[in-house]
Amino acid sequence: MINFLNEFDYQFTNPDYLKFLYALPVFWIVSIFAYRHVSVLKIILSTFLRSFVFLLVILVLGGFSGKEKSKREISAVYLMDMSDSITLEGKEWMWNYVKELDGVLDEKIKKGVVIFGGESKVITPTLTEDLKLEEILGKVTDSNISTDRTDIASGLMATLGIMPEDSSKIVVLLSDGNENQGKVEKALTMATGNDVKVFVVSPPDIREEGEILIKKVAVPREINEGEMFKVKVVIDNRNDRAVKGNLKLHKGGGILQEWDTEFKNGISVFEVPYQSKEQGFIKFKADLDIKDDELDLDKENNSKFAYVNVSGKTRLLYINGAKNQKMYLPDALKDKTIAVEIKTPDQIPKTLKEYLKYDSIIFSNVSRDFISAGQMTLLEKYVKDYGGGFVMTCGANITAEGGYSGTKIEEILPVKIIGGEPPKKKKKTRLSLVLIIDKSGSMLGRKMLFAKKASIELIKQLKVNDNFGIVAFDTAPYTIVELKKKEEVQKEIIRKLSMLKADGGTDIFPAMDSAYRQIMRTDSKVNHVILLSDGNTKSIYYHYNRMISKFQQANITVSTIALGTWLVNTKLLEDIAKKTKGQFYQITDIIRLPRLIVKDSEHFVSQSDFHEEHFYPTINQESQILKGIYDKQFPPLKGHTITEAKENVEVPLVTNIMGKTDPILANWRYGLGKVVVYASDANARWSSKWINWAMFNKFWSQVVRWSMRDISKANYDIKVKTDDDTVSLQIEPSSLLKDDTKLEVRLLSPDYIENGQKLLLKQVAPKRYISELNGVNPGTYNLKISRVRRGKVIDLKTKGLIVPEKTATIPLEYAVKDNNISQLNNIAEITGGKYNPLKEEITVEEQEVIISKGLEGFLIPLALLLFIIDIAVRKLNRQGN
């Protein structure tokens, strides 16, 4: 029925009421039984009247109406930009354009005028077919809107408010498009939702005479290390002729390129290819020098700069502590995507910025002596707070007491460097060290003084359970300090040394024999003698051969120090040292003596912190580090540093040769970083069989790759915006954060000297956060962006940031020189309009609209009339007529 009526230009607005027509048959049956004593003709007539009344009521309820076609009204608004960025000539041009366009548009179109600057103002609240433009111009002149800003969005919103909803809408926007306030995107969404077409007309670009400037220095915001890119300098010559001048492009503190040239009228682009070989921020600055001042009136715009942030490729730092030994581990890590820098222990980074250049840092048998407490604190921060990796391989230089024990490095390690052997063998691990001092007359004065100082420094290096003794000699031996445990002798050593006087002749043999006898009364694992003398000896060489043989058989090493040159029997001292596997030293500057003796003893002191014995490491648990390597594939090792695993540590490799399980390979997460300890060395002393192992490269590659800094999967779009005296940071994550995750941001200096400033973030949209940077000086910074869940950092990313210099001294409107064609084109395209159209093209297609006319004014009276007739029929029936 509805489709049938549609063909005749009728319709129902509430067709659901038509369902009540199904009740008519029931109505008819009831009527028949109600009038059983009435003639059939009257029954039919009364039923017909009531049915027709019922039908008319249903039609009214169903919204029965007629349809009439009509052409939609067209409304147009001239939206004019009155901001200061448009010159008086430009505004005059716009008014002339509106006058011409008003004469071209159809007379039936209702038109109005809205102006805007920093805010909008409606000049014609009601649209009319006959605009009085001269009167309107007077109203515009008298308006007091702010013109130091351009808010296109405000103008569009005001325009939408005065246009009739049921009309076809045209907006003619006259502007240069340089919006610096408001968000035109939101207004465009409203415009498209209301079927508004925006035709955009921009005033001609009136160029300034006597001006040439650097428009910009263009570089990529971020690139990878080694990537080639172009630095572009854009020159805008606004004179009507070519201008001679000089252009310099600086990189850092030097000149990258220089041009002595003639700049043509208009835009010129100068390009320089550049390949980045360093990480971090690179500054490029362009300077323009024009000799003729009349052609360059404003010198302030002759300098511009830009930064590019260079992200480095994966970089490892290898600190080699085993000097004079061939390095094998760096070769195992060779890869096109990884750069390995090899440095000596005295080149360990001293700033956090230096540490952060690397994805992982490897210490190979690095002695504690080469790293300060401050450097260790920085290393701990690098691992814990910045996610850096740390790998330590051990060796003879890694000691417990007097070494890494109790330091920040031991804190980040997954093991404790405990030293010694298991308790049941503890006494076999002690060191016995005897210092033999020449006290002959030639040692008088400074020699004896520094010999005593050396004795005191030496005992400080020893452990509590180590044995220490001092034997002095002239022509006979004198036991100054009997060989006993350090804790027993250290309290009286100064008193006993004070009694030592220099006099007499020189005979080394009896003193060596005394030292030998004292050592043989101990059960020490490591035995060492340090002999210092400045003269010749009375005993014949043959006797010394027998003594050297006894020292060799007892595994007692002897280091000898010759004080001076011409009186000393250097050949004898060299032979003693060489044949007992000690060291020979000769010094002329006695001040060096204490340090030399301490240095010589370090090797022997540290031997009680490691165990040298042939063994095969075994797999203790599955690990990503050992993927593809199986138990029986491991070659033997010859020694390892004695350590003890901490709690919650993964220990993939162990050894059981000493009656207990010692970790050989241990790893864990420390804060945001990862740490690995390999208790043996990576050199030929303990790992000679590993060097030629087929899996050597695979093993170390997997160890180091596991330790490397995690690559953050999060991406952020970061912008810095300046507005007058306000500088704000905008961060947009690439993905939404979960409900239990929050964003934390710290602004760090380029040198990472301090923890930086924690920024107060305000979430203004699901994926947008802003923070004010007021008080932050212009320059380069680093942003440390953390995703935190339940108090724990689950992702960390560090990105470079440039805070630009404030340019509020130049009013925003006057800083603008060109029409923003991209913005204007965008406005036209989104709304279905056109940019700079012909006047004849500013129109919309005529649209027909269906006007609905309700018929209730006819249906209701008809229903009342029929209802009265029905009543009359029933009355006549009761009277028998």
Image: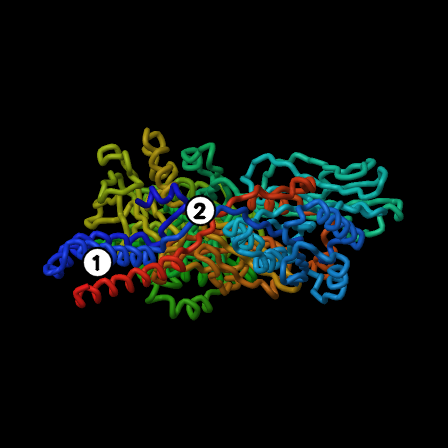
Choose between 409 and 690: the one closer to the eye. 409
* 298 left or right of 713 in image: right
Asked if labels 2 and 1 touch by Cβ distance under 8 angstroms, the answer is no
Residue 268 position by quadrant: top right
Choose between 876 and 179: the one closer to the eye. 876
The residue lying at 25 percent from left, 65 percent from top is 871
* 92 left or right of 600 in image: right
* Amino acid type, callout 2: Ile
- Residue 98 makes an appearance in the image: yes
* Amino acid type, callout 1: Ser
| Total marks placed | 2
| 1 or 2: mark nearer the eye | 1
x, y (%) of residue 803?
Answer: 61, 56
The residue lying at 65 percent from left, 43 percent from top is 842
Residue 361 circle label? 2
x, y (%) of residue 755?
Answer: 50, 62
Choose between 840 and 293: the one closer to the eye. 840
The residue lying at 49 percent from left, 46 percent from top is 69
* 450 left or right of 807 in image: left
* 669 left or right of 818 in image: left
The span from disc 1 to disc 2 (Cα, nearest Å) is 105 Å
| Residue holding disc 1 | 46
x, y (%) of residue 215?
Answer: 72, 45
Quick one: which residue is furthest to the front in this view? 881
Q: Is residue 84 above or below residue 633?
A: below
> Which numbered disc, 1 or 2, marks the residue that appears first in the sequence?
1
Which element is circle 2 on? strand
